[in-house]
Image: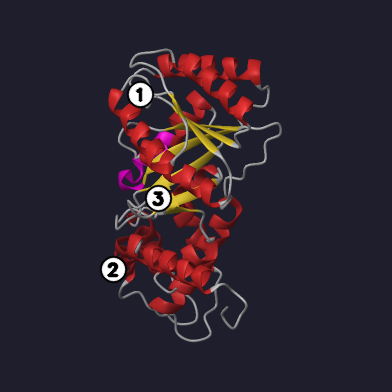
Amino acid sequence: MSTDGQNPETVGADRDWSDRLFGGFRKTTERLSENLSGIVGKSTLNDAQLDDIEDALIMSDLGPRAAARIRARLASERFERDADERAIMEVVAREIAEILRPVAKPLDVVAFPRPQVILVIGVNGSGKTTTIAKLAHLFQEQDYSVMLAAGDTFRAAAIGQLAVWADRLGIPLVKGPEGGDPASIVFDAVKAATEQGIDALIVDTAGRLQNKRELMDELSKIRRVLGRLNPEAPHDVVLVLDATNGQNALSQIEIFKEVAGVSGLIMTKLDGTARGGVLVAAAEQYGLPIHAIGVGEKIDDLRPFNPDLLARVIAGIA
C-alpha cells in the first residue's frame, strides 16, 4: 500500500489516466495558449484585452456562451500582481471547472428491477460502436453484468463490429439479420437480459440523420416495445459525440435532443484534437450530464472525468 493508504495500482492507473488527459487535450491547450499569448495587464484587464481573450476562447472551441461567461469573470477579477498568461489561465481554469462540475455525472447502474436499459445513439462515424464496447468494459470493471443489443440493423458492419467486441469482452449479444426490425431485437434483448438477471443492457441504434422523421419513428417504436416490458425503460439515452467535429457536435445535440430525448452525453476522440474545448461549450450550452470522455483507442480509454482536473488540463496549468 502507498503511504496515503491508496492501492499503488489505483494510484498508477489514476496517473496514467491523467497523462492520457494531458495528451488528449494537448492541442486544445496549445491552441488556447497561442491565442492568449502576449495578453498582459495590470491589476485589471481593459476592455480591449477582455475582447481579445473572449475571441481567443471562442477560437479554441469553448463556444460563445462559455467565452462570455469567462470574460465576465475576468472583468470582475482584481489580480494581486500584474496579470500575465498564468494568472489569466488560473481564472479561466476556475471558471471552466464551474461549468463542468454540474455535468460531470458518471453513468450509474441503479435501475430496479434490472436490467438498466441504455440506448446509445449518434451519427455514423462518431465512434458509437467502439464506445459501446468501452462502456461495457467500464461496467465490467465495476462488477456489473452486461449484455449488448445490435439495434443498428441497417449496417452489417455495425452488427459485425459489435459481435467482435462482445466476443472479446465475453458478454452476450442479441442480434438479428441486416435490415431486421430493431424494435424486435430490443424486445428479445430485454426479455433475455431480464431472465438472465443482467445488470446493464446497452443497445446500439441507427445513426442516420438524413431522414429525421424515420429515425424518430424507429426510436419511438423501440420505446413503446420497451415500455411493455419495463415501464421505466429506457433508463438512459446517451448521445456519442465526436470531438473532432468541433462546433458541429453542438448541432448534433440539438437534433438528437429533438429526435431522441437525449439524457446524457459521451464525448469521444479527444485524443489530440485541437477541438477539445467543445466539451466546455456543450456543458455550458446544454447542461446535459457528460457521463464519460474518450481519449484514445484502447478499451480502457473511456472514463468519467474529474471536472477540476480537466479544467486545469484544458487551461494548461494542471
| Percent coordinates x, y for residue 111 in the rendering | 67, 36
In the image, what residue type sits under mark 2? Glu
Residue positioned 56% across, 72% down in the render: 7
Residue 278: give its label. 3
**Callout 3 crowding tier (Cα within 10 Å): few <14, some 14–19, many ≥20:** many
In this view, the mark in front (1 or 2) = 1
Residue positioned 56% across, 24% down in the render: 192
**Callout 2 crowding tier (Cα within 10 Å): few <14, some 14–19, many ≥20:** few
> Is residue 310 among what the camera can see?
yes
Which residue has dot 2 on it? 34
In the image, what residue type sits under mark 3? Val
Could you tell which of marks 1 and 3 lies nearer the N-terminus?
A: 1
Residue positioned 52% across, 47% down in the render: 140
Q: Give the magenta range.
A: 243-252
| Percent coordinates x, y for residue 132 in the rendering | 43, 39
In 3D space, how far apart are the residues under numbered discs 1 and 2 (Cα atoms)? 37 Å
Q: Is 167 above or below relative to 82?
A: above
Image quadrant containing the C terminus: bottom left
In this view, the mark in front (1 or 3) = 1
| Percent coordinates x, y for residue 237 in the rendering | 53, 32
Q: Is 40 above or below relative to 134?
A: below
Most common secondary structure along the magenta stretch: helix
